[in-house]
Image (spheres, rainbow, N blue to C red):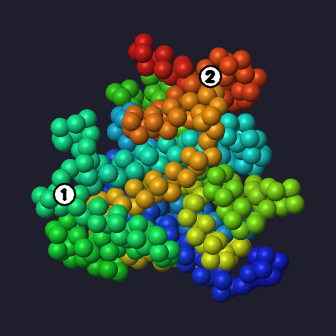
Amino acid sequence: MDKLFHLKERGTTVGRELVAGLTTFLAMAYILAVNPGMLGLTGMNPSAVFTATAVSAAVATLVMAFIANLPVALAPGMGLNAFFTFTVVMGMGCTWQLALTAVLVEGIIFILLSLCGIREAIIKSIPDNLKKAVAVGIGLFIAIIGLANAGIVSSQTGTIIGFVTFKMENAAALLAIIGLIITIVLYTLKVPGAILIGIVITTLIGIPMGVTKIPEGFKAVSAPDAPYFFAFDWKGTCMGADGVFSIAVLGKFIVILITFLFTDLFDTIGTLLGVAEQGNLKDKDGNVLNAKGALLADSVGTVVGACLGTSTVTSYVESSAGVGTGGRTGLASVFTAVLFLVSLLFSQVFLLIPSAATAPALIFVGYLMMKSVVDIKFDDPTEGIPAFITIIAMPFAYSISKGIMYGIITYVITKICAKKAKEIPVVTWVLAVIFLAEIIFEAVK
């Protein structure tokens, strides 16, 4: 173990890594309940998505363990699954098979970029404040989804959008509020796995309230359903147009692909930087240890996930919980991966959880992703305004891609107006042109 994971060199033990792996799993296992429910809204089979979620998480985390030797776990990403469901399928009118095709292409591109070291170069060229704004905007977007899914907010309140009254006829909304309070209390008390425990308690409370419904023939332990296998459709439908390579669909497909690419890029890099800082997992130059291997892990996981039927796989910030308990090597990731595989036997338990019980997790993850807002330079209009536009566009347009699109365009405009065009990276110029072309295409079609 020591030779493979350098335990002594990093000042840790097998026991400490076991605790760290378990803590990380408890902190992020809510995705096993949330992801099937969210992707299930697209028409996908939640049971099949559950299996794909667990297997892709395990595979990607094992790659992280053995290639990068870092205590970072991966799974289908929050925000990325929301983009898959609410923007690509529900918003753009694309089939979920076409969305999976975009995820597959993204994963293949990322593998190539990771092997060539290009991903590290790309991330350096994106303005720092926009990276932070993307995380904050996604956090608000996820929180809005949680509030809406639980029926806590509605347009039926006499205002554009408002909170419903918490009466028993709104049992799901009431249960979600109870669950949110439980999660806040547990997290404040620093209970490991606060989000997952909150989901479990909320689900149990939902039984007498009639929100959690136990089906006939329920079995706590059972064999998992088969995932989707290579459910790609290059002739998928998007807004009534057939074929990825038709002119009408190609523009949409490029926007979908770019959004998956850069959202995943920001998620992974941000998580790696945060975990490396917390655990002092940096080289002599202050860079993340084995960064290339870490970036390769989410690329492989994304390809595996797409082939099995789930959205983009990315590194989880909840890994910091395991690092906080002493995790320093990939051995912690091995333990986390094994627990994901064990969870396959409990698919019916996870699928029993109602949306009112997972809504608090979505809302709370929104809080966790809001932390980056304090580092945005709002005193500089050329940095603060694009960040602000990015943040508000995502929840109010109900689209992550719109937030990124308008944020980058605004960034270019403000820099040009301030005579700071030289500060605009080449990649940002390219993205701005692509996004402007998309807006023009939408206007004239």
Residue 339 lies, with reference to residue 357, above or below; the image says below
Residues at circles 2 and 1 in contact by the CB criterion of under 8 Å: no
Looking at this rendering, what residue extends furthest in the top direction?
Answer: 444
Q: Measuring 30% from the left and 70% from the top, which residue is drawn there?
A: 202
Looking at this rendering, what residue extends furthest in the bottom direction?
Answer: 15
Residue 209 lies, with reference to residue 231, above or below; the image says below
Q: Is residue 196 left or right of residue 154?
A: right
Q: Which mark is residue 414?
A: 2
Of residues 382 and 272, which is closer to you in this image? 382
The quadrant where residue 284 appears: bottom right
Q: Is residue 96 left or right of residue 19?
A: left
The quadrant where residue 329 appears: bottom right
Q: Measuring 80% from the left and 82% from the top, which residue is drawn there?
A: 8
- Secondary structure under badge 1? loop
Q: Measuring 72% from the left and 61% from the top, which residue is drawn there?
A: 277
Badge 1 is on which residue? 166
- Secondary structure under badge 2? helix
Residue 429 lies, with reference to residue 55, above or below; the image says above
Is residue 112 in view? yes
Dot 1 amino acid type: Phe
Marks 2/1: CA distance? 44 Å
Task: Pick the quarter of the image with the C terminus.
Answer: top left
Disc with the residue nearer the chain's start (2 vs 1) = 1
Task: Pick the quarter of the image with the N terminus.
Answer: bottom right
Q: Measuring 64% from the left and 71% from the top, which residue is drawn there?
A: 323
Q: Which mark is residue 363?
A: none
In the rendering, at what x and y percent does residue 224 appear?
39, 71
Looking at this rendering, what residue extends furthest in the left direction?
Answer: 169
Of residues 267 and 184, which is closer to you in this image? 184
Dot 2 amino acid type: Thr
In the rendering, at what x and y percent does residue 244 appear?
48, 31
Is residue 225 in view? no
